[in-house]
Image (cartoon, rainbow, N blue to C red):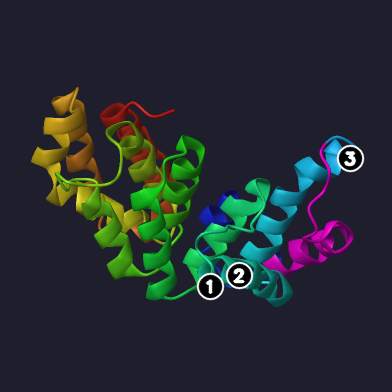
Amino acid sequence: MDHQEDLLGDHEIFLQVQLYFLNLILPLYNNIGWTLINQTTDWRRALLQPEVLSTVCYYGYRECIDAARSIYRRWYLNPARNPIPMSLRSTVYCMVVREGSHEEFEFLWNRLKHELVPSETVNLLDCLACTKDRSRIVWFLNQHLNNESVIREQDMPRSISNVARSRNSNQITWIWIQDNWPQLFSKWGKTVRQLNDFKIFADSIADKGTVYRQFQLSLDKSMQVLFGTP
């Protein structure tokens, strides 16, 4: 999906390509559905389920989006009990953040504040990066530099990199990195000269949209240098 968006996101054919792949995967989606699958008796379908659901929802299939929001809503109304299966949480969280309101984003952020389970903390952080709203993207990035941030130090590089990998927030993240250069280096800086060279190169590109894939790859490499992420 990411490669499709990187290569075709600026072209009219992109929506047609998405529709084509959606029609290919819909029979599998209808077969697998949202009912939790027993990993012991049917491990192949259990492994496929989150990937299939995530893909179909990403392609904008309304039934999938509504199902994700419905199961999320049950948790929202009763925060003490999360009914979302562990294997489907990242799918549901990301879809709600991407398609939902500020209120829904805030709910997951508040859950992160009180979360004690490391795996669930990572789930929540990864999915908060799914937002398409510019103001929420900037706000979320700023939380990584907040001295009293609820984001654990060891999770910050991964989280910032996740935001940067999204087409919706890639260039926003790059501007944020430029604006916060000194603070970032004080936390993780290793090779100042390399990153300054990259900054000069990136600034020389007048219209990054025309060479988006190359810019994305270059930014990914710079993030690896800065944060040591894979």
Residue bearing the label numbered 2: 74
x and y, in percent, of residue 155 in the image: 35, 36
| Residue 29 falls inside the magenta stretch | yes
The crowd level at tag 3 (other Cα within 10 Å; few <14, some 14-19, many 20+) is few
Q: How far apart are marks 1 and 2 (CA)?
A: 5 Å
> At 84% from the left edge and 37% from the top edge, which residue is drawn?
43
Residue type indicated by callout 3: Asp
| Residue 207 falls inside the magenta stretch | no
x and y, in percent, of residue 153 in the image: 27, 34
Q: Is mark 2 on a helix, strand or loop?
A: helix
Question: Quick check: 6 above or below 66?
Answer: above
Question: Secondary structure of the magenta portion, mostly?
Answer: helix
Looking at the picture, tell me which residue is in the foreground, 51 or 123. Answer: 123
Residue type indicated by callout 2: Arg
The answer to whether residue 59 of the structure is visible from this angle is no
Q: How many marks?
A: 3
Looking at the picture, tell me which residue is in the foreground, 229 or 170. Answer: 229
Q: Which of marks 3 and 1 is nearer the N terminus?
A: 3
> At 46% from the left edge and 48% from the top edge, which residue is drawn?
126
Residue bearing the label numbered 1: 77
Left or right: 12, with 44 as reference point:
left
- Of circles 3 and 2, the one toward us is 2
The answer to whether residue 50 of the structure is visible from this angle is yes
Left or right: 48, with 112 as reference point:
right
| Label annotation for residue 42 | 3
Left or right: 50, with 201 as reference point:
right
Q: In which quarter of the image is residue 116?
A: top left
Query: Which residue range is magenta in the image?
Result: 18-39
Left or right: 128, with 50 as reference point:
left
- Residue located farthest toward the left when viewing the structure as drawn: 182
Asked if marks 1 and 2 touch (Cβ < 8 Å), the reply is yes
> At 30% from the left edge and 34% from the top edge, which residue is drawn?
222
